[in-house]
Amino acid sequence: MEELIVFLEGFSEIAIAIRLAVATLFGSLIGWERITKNHYHYVGIRTFALVSLGSAVAIVLNMELALRANMQTDVGRIPAGVVSGIGFLGAGMILVTGRNKIKGLTTAASIWVTANMGMAIGGGFLRVGTVCFALIMIANRLLQRFSQKVEMYSHFMSIYLEVEKAKGVVKLRKFLSDSGYELLSMNKVKEKPLQSSDVAIAIELDLKGQTEHSKVLEKIGNLDYVNYLEES
């Protein structure tokens, strides 16, 4: 087994070809995971596979140029270009909705670290790349559940609401104060409410204790002047 790993981490054409295939496979699996979790994104299996493969090819090219006797090259230039280039690609995946809700951060981070994984695999650090792949999947799958659990009981909460224009905001302020919640901010958002008689607002609360967010949403949702709400 050790001999096989040593061979795959070498620089024969067969070893490089296998590493490129592994990088493409790992990228595809990460893209598949993102599709199953983020239906609103058009970034999927092919994008992640190509990012991983492209990064692997870039690092192989970089190392091949560095190994040639008559070539003078900065071995860190191409990897640095890949990292910054993928940063621009990831930035295009981050969306801020009319409800002041940010989407796409995890996908952007995933595609950035996938590029680094591809460079590790392409550069012959197969074990590092494999561990990186495993950690990406763990972070996106297992840590998401843990994160959701922590966020469910966080002291701080952001809510998007649609309330009646006529004194709905005033009544909501009073209700929050009477419930012991501290209103950190309240802003009108661009989102068009479902009913023309409503106003759309985004609020941030300090719950002042270990309170399950679903119970807070239920209490606010039962108010007769609140016609729609969701945690953001």
Image (tube, rainbow, N blue to C red):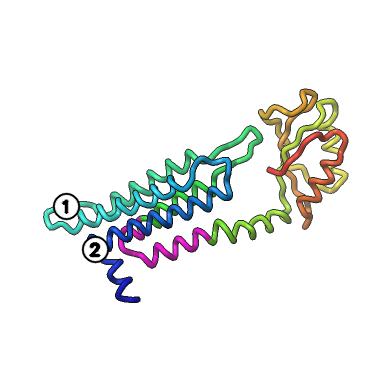
Residue 3 appears left or right of 108: left
Q: Residue 221's x, y, as percent? A: 82, 41
Q: Which residues are magenta?
A: 119-137
Type of amino acid at the residue the image marks with label 1: Gln
* Above or below, comparing residue 117 to residue 196 in the picture: below
Residue ID at (75%, 36%): 161
Q: Nearer the viewer, residue 111 or 168?
A: 111
Q: Is residue 96 magenta?
A: no
Distance between the alpha carbons at the discs numbered 1 and 2: 20 Å
| SS category of the residue bearing label 2 | loop
Q: Residue 122's x, y, as percent? A: 32, 58
Type of amino acid at the residue the image marks with label 2: Phe
Residue farthest toward the bottom in the current orientation of the protein: 2
Q: Which residue is mark 2?
A: 11
Q: Quadrant of residue 150?
A: bottom right
Q: Quadrant of residue 226?
A: top right
Point out the image quarter for the C terminus. Answer: top right
Q: Quadrant of residue 121?
A: bottom left
Q: Nearer the viewer, residue 15 or 180?
A: 15
Count neighbours of disc 2 (C-alpha within 10 A) and say few if under 14, some if 14 to 19, many if 20 or more: some
Q: Which residue is mark 1?
A: 72
Decide: marks 1, 2 in contact (CB < 8 A)?
no
Point out the image quarter for the N terminus. Answer: bottom left
| SS category of the residue bearing label 1 | loop
Residue farthest toward the top in the current orientation of the protein: 196
Kindly report the secondary structure that dominates the magenta region of the rendered protein.
helix
